[in-house]
Image: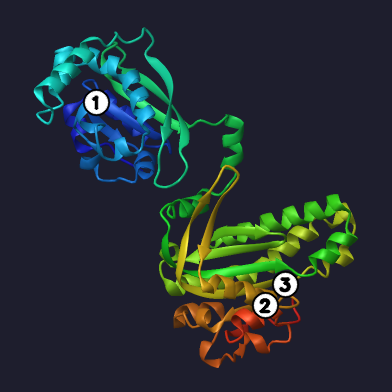
Amino acid sequence: MSSPPAFLATRTAPSLAAVVEELAKTAWAVSVFDDEWRMVWVSDEQKALLGEWDEAALGYGQRVPETFGSGPWREALSDDGVMRWTADVLPWIVADTPGGADAVAAMLGNTLADDERERIRENLRAVPPPPDTEVWVSKLTFLQGELPPVAVDYVGLRLRDPTGTLLGTLLLYAPALPASILLLVSRGDPGMFGRMAQLIEPGRQRAAILFADLQSSTGLSRRLPTAAYFRLVRAATTAVDQVIIDHDGIVGKHTGDGVTAFFLAQDLGGISAAARSAIHAARALPEAAFQAAAALTDDVALIDDFNQYRINVGLHWGGTLYMGQVVTGGRLEVTALGDEVNACARIQESARDGQLLASKDLVERLDPEHAADLGIQPEALVYQELGELAGATDKAVRDAATVPVTSLLPADRSGR
């Protein structure tokens, strides 16, 4: 939670500090200015969106013309956005600044030529007075790295104490989405979305990789009514995703009845912790999915089919995965590139009847404490090359035949 800056209590009214204290309890993107349009506070969420946490770089204690002309604020707005934002707030800035347009022009410093400064001064003198209402709503286009531009609504609100004395101005930014859509997005897990947000800039990551898939899903889909099978897939997918989330992983792509997940060393506190979390999640997946499926048996009355509900899991280690967000008009997901991702898919494809196949490269990332927590003795495990397994697919033989793997669950159990 972002606390008010130290100078807020000494250079501005206590009432403004109280407003900031309340705003700091929210997860909103907010900026607060004092009665002379000095930047006094930026919320943590606003800092995260700008990718800037240094308060000097954000312009704390500086007036708007000094703050928004360059740096993280300018980089976050399109040219049209800058023009619109300026048109919205400039009447207030000129009206609030002692000396008016001339004083605002003087704030631009000595970086401009005399003729440029004079032209700006004349333009400022032509700025109309602010509107009668002290609340306004406008739109901006927000820029964030290489991601597509985003439409943002913002609300400006003048802050006054009970006597009517001006305290400052609050600007609150939010996605330009209907509340019903925001509520839909809000059903996602904030912790996982936060982990995804850290991958806004693609780069190299160390992570445990998990692939899981429902065995014999084609036959099950043929035996079940389509509506019942849809309910089954939806319930099981929700349960599987929740297991990944609960173990601090990131859910990747869903393909058919399968799921991909990543457990990043940077999120889990280290390489061994990431490997441990992936194994814990892999062991919990079959039970969670089976229980979600079994909960539907009263509805579809097909318990015998659910007894054959088996999830096969593959685990592998990626030491140099190239990971980042994929954001389009139709989806938001994290994807990873690297030979290890392909190898993990082949490991999972070769698992049978509820097996959990883990690569030697993953298991040997465990330190003794984490191995003991999992009940694993790495020095006692025996590995087989993937191509030697009875269930090895043609793709596995072609792409990852020599990858050593071991079963961390008995081959005749679904994990329950």
The residue indicated by pointer 2 is 395
* Distance from Cα at disc 2 to Cα at disc 3: 29 Å
CA distance for labels 1 and 2 = 68 Å
In this figure, which residue is indicated by the disc labeled 3?
416
Sequence-wise, which precedes: disc 1 or disc 2? 1
Residue 323 placement (x, y as % from top left): 47, 61
**Can residue 408 be seen from the camera position used here?**
no
Q: Which mark is residue 14?
A: 1
Question: Helix, strand or loop at disc 2?
Answer: helix
User: Going from the N terminus, do you reach mark 2 or mark 3 first?
Assistant: 2
Indicate whether 153 appears above or below 190.
above
Q: Quadrant of residue 17?
A: top left
Residue located at (30% from left, 36% from top): 73
Is the Cβ of the residue at disc 2 closer than 8 Å to that at disc 3?
A: no
Tag 2: amino acid: Lys
Q: Which mark is residue 201?
A: none
Q: Using the image, determine if residue 361 lies above or below residue 114.
A: below
Could you classify mark 1 by the number of other residues whose Cα lies within 10 Å: few (under 14), some (14-19), or many (20 or more)? some
For the point 24% across and 36% down, the residue is 70
Q: Nearer the viewer, residue 269 or 217?
A: 217
* Image colouring: rainbow
* Residue at horizontal 13 percent and vertical 28 percent from the top: 112
Q: CA distance from mark 1 to mark 3?
A: 60 Å
Measured from the top left, where is residue 180 in percent x and y? Answer: 61, 32
| Residue 358, x across and y down, in percent | 59, 79
